[in-house]
Every structure is written in structure tokens, then in C-alpha cells.
Image (cartoon, grey):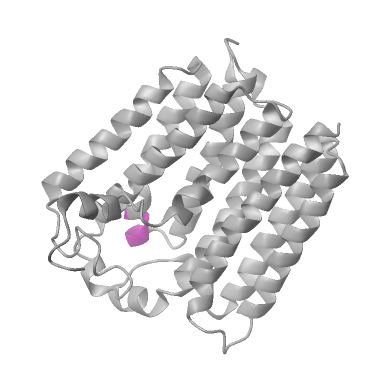
Amino acid sequence: MSGSESTFGAIVRLLRWDKPEGRLILMLPALWALFLAARGYPAMGLVLIVVVGSIVTSAAGCVVNDLWDRDIDPKVARTKNRPLASRRLSVKVGVVVMLVGFLCAYGLTLFLNAQTFWLCVAAVPVIVLYPAMKRVFPIPQLVLAIAWGFAVLISWSMVSCGALPAATVCLGSENWILCAATVFWTLGFDTVYAMSDREDDRKLGIYSSALFFGKRAPQAIAVFYFLTSLLLAKLGQVMGLGWMFWACWMVASGLWALQSVRLMDRRVPHWFYAASFRQNVAIGFILLAGMIAGVWQI
């Protein structure tokens, strides 16, 4: 990056606010759960908490990731210009920004019920430890997927738990189905994303699902997308969602199928990996629209 970049601009890049796709792709499962749990009519205050909470939590997670990887990122073409990797920002600044992000997220939990609060607390170790998993766990994307699954459980409990004394009362089958679908969806799109870094990760001895599955990575992604589609279909059946959900489900499933076929072509261009990630954001919005319309038709 240019040496004239302001500190504020570097912090914006540290938080990844210059790349909204990564914020949206976490926000979407949380919004899926919120609108489904509220049968299409969540309180606007809860929508605001989910939107702001997703932004600050994912931003704080990005800072955690860059703090863990500040000595690795300079050796990877895609990440070498990140503010901590390039030493544009100091570790001290990174820690302060991270703490502010988590403090903002904590402030939002004060407006939530006890069950939701403790789900938020349980998600923090997953977020903090995920970057370390790339050094010790063969499929670190699974840890990220579990973090995404927490977004579903947290949002659902915001609506359905209220002041009930036990979390098991409010965590029913629908949100666990949606949670599982979100986990498989995240495994799919993040394995695609990891395929762009395979050579660098291999040289550095970093684990990823793309390296774990090797030549079978496209087939694994296809399975993850298929399971996502299957679980969403089960969710639609259990909740009795209307035909507009099924129309959007068919579009999403078709796009995942097209992605899977394209990835199996050995001549797939490198840019396609990032493009697939961005397409999943669009797919997420298609599904959100279908869920809202589908639940209104009940």
C-alpha cells in the first residue's frame, strides 16, 4: 500500500471494512435465523443488533487472525500488504483495535437475554482460536464453520428464548437444522477460498481444507454444498415454508451445482476462487429473501 496511507485508512483495512463481502457472509446466517425465528417479523432493535454485532464481531475476528498471522502473512502474496504484516500498524495498535471490537460486541449483549449472552460468550474462544488451528488442525475451516454456526444459534435465541430458564427450551430442531446447513455452507465456500492459497500454505506448512482434500477438494466442496441444500430443504419442510422459499432454494442449489462443476475443471482460472466467494454472498441474500417470503406464506 502507499506510504501516504493514513492510520485511519490502515485500521479500516485491518478491520476489513474495505471488503464488505466478508462481513456480509457472516451477517447472512444470523439474519436467516432471526427472520425465521420471528416468523418474518423480527423487532427492528434485534435486526440492528444483529447487523452491528456481525460487523464488529467479524472485524474483531479479522484483527485476531492478523495478530496470529503477522509473521506468516508477509510470505503470502494475497496477504503480504495487510497492515500488521507490512508493519504499517504495530501489534499494540492491533491489540487495542481488537479489544475495542470485542468491547463493542459485549456492549450489545447487555440488551439480550441470558441464554443468548452465554452463547455469545461460548463463541469467543472459537473466534480467538480459529487462526491457531491452521498450525495444528488439518481442517481449520471446520472451526470457522462452527463459529458461523454460533451466529445462527445466537440470533435464534434472541427471538425465542426470552427469559426462559433453560437454553434447551428454546433450541429446537429448526435452528439446529439451520445451524448444520450453515456449517456445511461455510465449509464449502471457505474451502473454495482456501484453494487460492494452496501453494503458499504448502510451502509454509499451514493446514487448510483445500490441502487436506487435495485433488478431491472440488468433490468435497460439491458434497458440502449438496448437504447445505439438503438441510435447507429439510428446514423448509419442517417449517412449512411457502413456494417462494422453494423457488429461491432452487436458484441457490443451481448456483452451487454450477460452482461445483466449474471447480472440477483443472483449467479453472485463479480469479474464480474469489469470484465464487462473492457469489455466495449473493446466494445468501437470495436465500434470505426466500426465507422471509416463504415464512410470510405460512
Viewer-nearest residue: 135 or 35: 35
Q: Is residue 289 above or below residue 256?
A: above
The residue under the point 45% across, 49% down is 23
Whether residue 112 appears in this view of the structure is yes
Image quarter of the N terminus: bottom left
Q: What residue is shown at x 58% (from left), y 88% (from top)?
A: 266
The reply to whether residue 212 is visible in this rendering is no
Dominant SS type (magenta): helix
Left or right: 138, with 225 as reference point: left
Quick check: 53 above or below 42? below
Q: How many marks do you count on the picture?
A: 0
In the displayed structure image, the side of residue 10 where residue 27 appears, left or right: right
Residue found at x 52% / y 38%: 150
Quadrant housing residue 124: top left
Q: What percent of the width, then of the height, locates residue 139? A: 47, 60
Quadrant assignment, res 260: bottom right
Asked if residue 72 is positioned above or below residue 288 in the image, the reply reads below
Residue 172 lies, in percent from the top left, at 70, 27
Residue 203 among magenta residues: no
Q: Quadrant of the C terminus?
A: top right
Report which quarter residue 134 is drawn in: bottom left
User: Which residue is depicted at the point 51% across and 23% down?
Assistant: 116
- Locate residue 161, reporting x and y percent: 61, 18
Q: Is residue 91 left or right of residue 47?
A: left
Asked if residue 130 lies left or right of residue 71, the reply is right
Find the magenta span and give its range: 132-136
